[in-house]
Amino acid sequence: MNARYARKTRRGVVAAAIVSVALFAAGCGADEKPPTDKPTSTTVAPPKSGAATQGTEPAEQPTETLAVLKGLKGLQLAITSVERDAGGFLTIKGRLSNAGDSGSAVPAQVSGDETEVVKHGTSLGGATLVDSVGKKRYYVLRDTDGRPLTTSGLGVVKAGDAIDVFMQFPAPPASTTEVSFQLPTFEPATLKLS
């Protein structure tokens, strides 16, 4: 009697398991829409003036360069945007490129000399903004772990290559319309603030 009961119980458990798997599989596909022969629609922004016409490759939009800072061994930093945001930050974006004939390592000095920043690897954490009228210097912001709010993990830039970079600073007062941007081993540049 015990052997018959055990077989019956096993069959019941197996049957229950199969039903559960079937219900689960059916439930997983319940939210899916049935396939249609119609292609999905996409929204395309209207072409801007100077954009490519239908049937040709779209032209890459040129990026405005606000300043170019020359560094060591062919390295250059082209600043492409300086934007204040409502949160009280100023974000600088650009492209770090190598105009030399061979690969060039990003100098460790660009990270600055603060221990908390340096321990997170090569970054642009040594960048500063100088407001000569307001007599203030602004440093790259850091998170609670001391990591700079800037591009990090910089190594060797191959000849002809470029890397998109950013740096975030506290925003100077709205009355400040011009700052000097400084990055160790690079020439300084004057940036207009809007």
Image: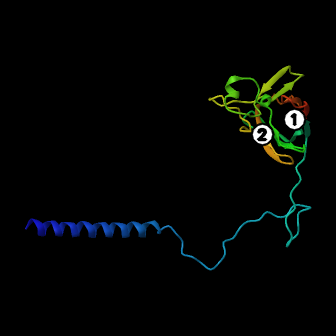
Q: Amino acid at mark 1?
A: Leu
- Where residue 99 sits in the image (x, y, percent)? 90, 44
- Examine the rendered structure and indicate whether residue 28 appears above or below residue 135: below
Q: Quadrant of the C terminus?
A: top right
Indicate the secondary structure of the residue bearing disc 1: loop
- Examine the rendered structure and indicate whether residue 138 appears above or below residue 83: above
- Where residue 65 sits in the image (x, y, percent)? 90, 44
Total residue callouts: 2
Residue at point 67%, 28% (across, down): 119
41 sits left or right of 73 in the view: left
Along the line of sight, the residue nearer the viewer: 155 or 125: 155
- Where residue 32 sits in the image (x, y, percent)? 52, 69
Indicate the secondary structure of the residue bearing disc 2: strand
Give the number of the disc on residue 24: none
Along the line of sight, the residue nearer the viewer: 51 or 94: 94
Return the residue at label 2: 166
Along the line of sight, the residue nearer the viewer: 169 or 120: 120
- Examine the rendered structure and indicate whether residue 115 appears above or below residue 120: above
Residue at point 77%, 30% (across, down): 108
Return the residue at label 1: 193
Along the line of sight, the residue nearer the viewer: 16 or 156: 156
Rounded to the nearest whole Å, what is the CA distance between mark 2 and mark 1? Answer: 16 Å
Mark 2 residue crowding within 10 angstroms, few (<14) / some (14–19) / many (20+): many
Quarter where residue 133 is shown: top right
